Image: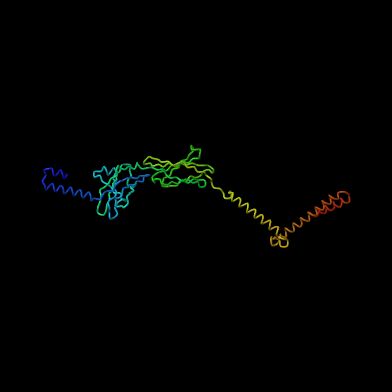
Amino acid sequence: MAFWLLRMNVPLTRRIFTLVLLHLDLIRCILMLQPPGRLTMESINMIHTLRWRPLQTPCSTAALYSVQYQGEFERTAPNATWLDVYECQNISHTHCDVTLDLVSDSDYNIRVRAQCESQISQWTCLSPPFNRKDTLLTVPQMAVSAVGYALLVTFDQAPPTASINVTVWKRGDKAQADVYTILAEEKVLRVAALQEGVVYCLKAHMILEQLSRTGSTEIHCVPIKGTHAPWKSTTTVVVTLVLMAGVLLATFWTVVHCRAHDSHQCTYKEPLPSSLVSLMTMMMKLLIRYTLVQGCQTHFSSGATLRKICAHRRAGLLKSWH
């Protein structure tokens, strides 16, 4: 430019003024704060994070950054306005979560500028524009555990706006599968009323309806062991048998070692009621008499005189019973 001015037929005063302006522009460019560089968008499971390289120019204070975005509506407006990302104004870190600002499936222009004390840099734009359809959809982390006759299925690292379809079937019988649907924000699914001793398999599908995209987990198979009663366990049975054997041995030892003269110290005899004693005494007398009569008839069945004596005794006893 300076060489061109010298060759042109331009008045000297004008030449000097133009050269001064050119030098001032060059000095301003050199002294101006450099804008942030290497803008990138990291978008995973609908979480959009803008990142950039820290300010390279030395700054006596912490460098501050501000972020703006421009959607389809703002871009086509007459003034082509830009909107501030509210949570990313004058921030000191070199990343910004713009998830809540990018709410449509259109292309977004995003830009960042830096500030060091009173110096403010130019804007640096993300290139190319970002569309949330380009988000990376990962497979949710699924954990399965058996609790009694139910399965507990937990999910982690899933987008809060996604829904999850869980397919459950008996191993070897996938045709009879059941499908359960939960929101990713619920995180836990309980599948109850399952059969004991059966192995159940599960597979989850994560769905983002706004993107019409899905992600599937691996198949997990878990056996249902049910709830066993404590007395059915081997340890409980063994302990019970040992205790019973100990009680029996203690009882036997007590009976053997209790002497006759101090048996009252080992056992306590409750006296019988008088009515019961009288009844038992009468029954014993009758039994003895009946036995004598039967013995008389058995042992003295020969001889008329002896038979008459036995008959007389039996008749007397029968008369006394009545």
Q: Name the quadrant of the N terminus.
A: top left
Q: How many marks?
A: 0
Observer-nearest of 41 and 45:
41
Q: Is residue 314 left or right of residue 184?
A: right
Q: Position of residue 7 (x, y in %)?
A: 13, 43
Q: Position of residue 45 (x, y in %)?
A: 38, 44
Observer-nearest of 263 and 271:
263
Q: Name the quadrant of the C terminus.
A: bottom right
Q: Is residue 155 left or right of residue 309?
A: left
Q: How is the image coloured?
A: rainbow
Q: Position of residue 299 (x, y in %)?
A: 85, 50
Q: Is residue 121 left or right of residue 155?
A: left
Q: Is residue 307 left or right of residue 122?
A: right
Q: Position of residue 44 (x, y in %)?
A: 37, 44
